[in-house]
Image: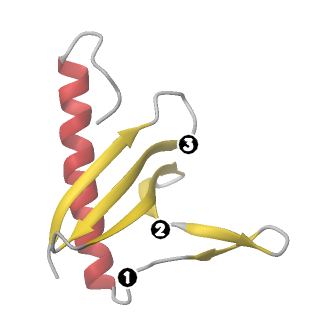
Amino acid sequence: MQITDVRIRMIPDESKLKAVVSVTFDDEFVVHDIKVIDGQNGLFIAMPSRKVGEGDFRDIAHPLTSEVRSRIKDAIFQEYDRLQAETSAAPGGSQEY
């Protein structure tokens, strides 16, 4: 299974949520609402989830192996870094991609 598209919507405010991502696999299957979050140890991705019970969240979709999680994370951060560089280089550039 190959990652064929990564679409990122940057979040312009100063919250911990930095971006919301959609990842397409094999031009046939897409996972929406993957979040890029700025945590205590730097940026990380959070898979789409929903609230169950009081304060508990459960992933709706997630990789089954650490290798696949790593490939998804690397593809997201590669595109995220590219957009960050593009945005900082363009005066008054848009935050939506």
Q: Quadrant of residue 19?
A: top left
Q: Closest to the observer: 11 or 67?
A: 11
> Which residue sits at x=27%, y=45%?
80
Asked if 51 appears above or below 78 in the picture, the reply is below
Residue on which the image places disc 2: 47
Residue 79, percent across and down?
A: 21, 48
N-terminal-most mark, 3 or 1: 3
Where is mark 1, residue-wise? 63
- Give the percent coordinates (x, y) of residue 20: 43, 49
Between the C-alphas of marks 1 and 2, the distance is 9 Å
Give, as a three-letter code, the residue at label 1: Pro
Question: Disc 2 residue type?
Answer: Met
Label 2 element class: loop
Residue 34: image x %, image y %?
A: 43, 60
Residue at (18%, 28%) from the top-left corner?
Answer: 86
* Residue at the (27%, 81%) spot, across then down: 68
Give yes or no for contact between labels 1 and 2 (Cβ–Cβ under 8 Å): yes
